Amino acid sequence: MRAKLASSLAHIFDRMASTLGIEDSELGPLLAEIMAHRQAPSVFATYFELVFALKAKRHDEAARLWRQIAAAVGQTPRFDVAPLTVEALGGDAARFARLLNAGENGPIFGPPDVAQWPAFATGVAEAFSLLEQADAALAAEIRALIVLVIGSAPLSPASSFGGVTSLTLWGAVTLNTELHRTPLEILDGLVHEGAHTLLFGYALDERLVRNPDSQRFASPLRSDPRPMDGVFHATFVCARLYLLYRRLLERRPEGLRGFDPRALERKMAELASRFDDGARLIADKASLTPLGEKVLRSSVDYMSHDAAA
């Protein structure tokens, strides 16, 4: 993802440097910093707003956003948990909210309940502890994908969401604190959103499906009809969550002491059923790219092998 960011910024420089008032000497250090280390979600968010500003020919705004990126790329982000508030995120709070709400009919993402925040922040640490005990490789993968967990809540009772992952906030996931109260619920959300992030990374150069987004289908994880790409994502998420609950059942981390294993088994059965529904729909209706075939095959192979064990 950093290589894509660097390449796009170099392209913008080639086309727009004089318009944006960027000196020739500025590009090299900027690209070197991007490629040298991990970049914060705020850098990617600012980049996408830069692209939007250029498309709208808001050149003064684009120049300001370029300078913000140049000032930020030298900082290596550390893992953090933050509410969607100005106090925690500064100017990024409004930017993140704009980008999160961009695909919605109206704004739905707001700050979390202050009273819930301490338990949620502590719960994220406890969730990672559970995962590290249950599956160290999966824990390492999630940490490699996610550097910021944003706590949010719906702006009104009429709107609802569980969690959100957006390519525009690469490295960040947003969880609804009202629906993620326990370490296990938070862990479920992290693995769920981490799976979406992984697929976004896979699909940077090649789509997973060829079906147009105008085609809508029933989804394993959503009540509303979704494009086939969404069905593919949901089916993949079911497999990843099944793996999580299988590992929790096998390893029984200390944080789950006293937890009824039958509840984990019921969750696994539900996820397996949803995965089967999604895989059948994909087999029947999807036009998969070679990448989509490869990713789906690995999930089907795992689920089939586990069912046969």
Image (spheres, helix red, strand yellow):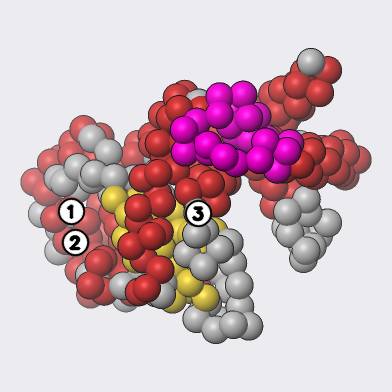
Q: How many labels does the image show?
A: 3
Q: Could you classify mark 3 by the number of other residues whose Cα lies within 10 Å: few (under 14), some (14-19), or many (20 or more)? A: some
Identify the mark nearer the N-term, 3 or 2: 2
| Above or below, 143 relative to 183 | above
User: Earlier along the polypeptide chain: callout 3 or callout 1?
Assistant: 1
Q: What residue do we see at 43% from left, 30% from top? A: 132
**Of marks 3 and 2, the one in the foreground:** 3
| Distance in Å between CA atoms under marks 1 and 2 | 6 Å
The picture quadrant where one finds residue 117 is bottom left
Q: Which of 133 and 24 is in front in this view?
A: 133
Can residue 247 be found in the magenta stretch?
Answer: yes
Q: Where is residue 203 in the image (x, y as percent from the top left)?
A: 57, 39
Dot 1 crowding, Cα within 10 Å, few <14, some 14–19, many 20+: some
Q: Where is residue 126 in the image (x, y as percent from the top left)?
A: 40, 44
User: Relative to 41, does residue 29 appear above or below in the rendering?
Assistant: above
Q: Position of residue 225 (x, y in %)?
A: 79, 62
Residue visible at 73% across and 59% down in the picture: 222
Quarter of the image where one finds residue 10: top left
Q: Residue furthest front?
A: 258
List the residue tagged with mark 1.
Answer: 72
Q: Which residue is drawn at 40% across and 49% down?
A: 124
Do the residues bearing badges 1 and 2 touch, measured as CB atoms within 8 Å? Answer: yes
Residue tagged 3: 182
Residue 114 shown in magenta: no
290 w.r.t. 68: above or below: above
The C terminus - image quarter: top right
Residue occupied by mark 2: 68
Which residue type carries mark 1? Answer: Ala
> As shown in the figure, which amino acid type bears the numbered disc 3?
Thr
Q: Nearer the viewer, residue 264 or 275?
A: 264
Apparent side of residue 132 relative to residue 275 in the rendered image (left or right): left
Looking at the rendering, the stretch of residues picked out in magenta corresponds to 241-265
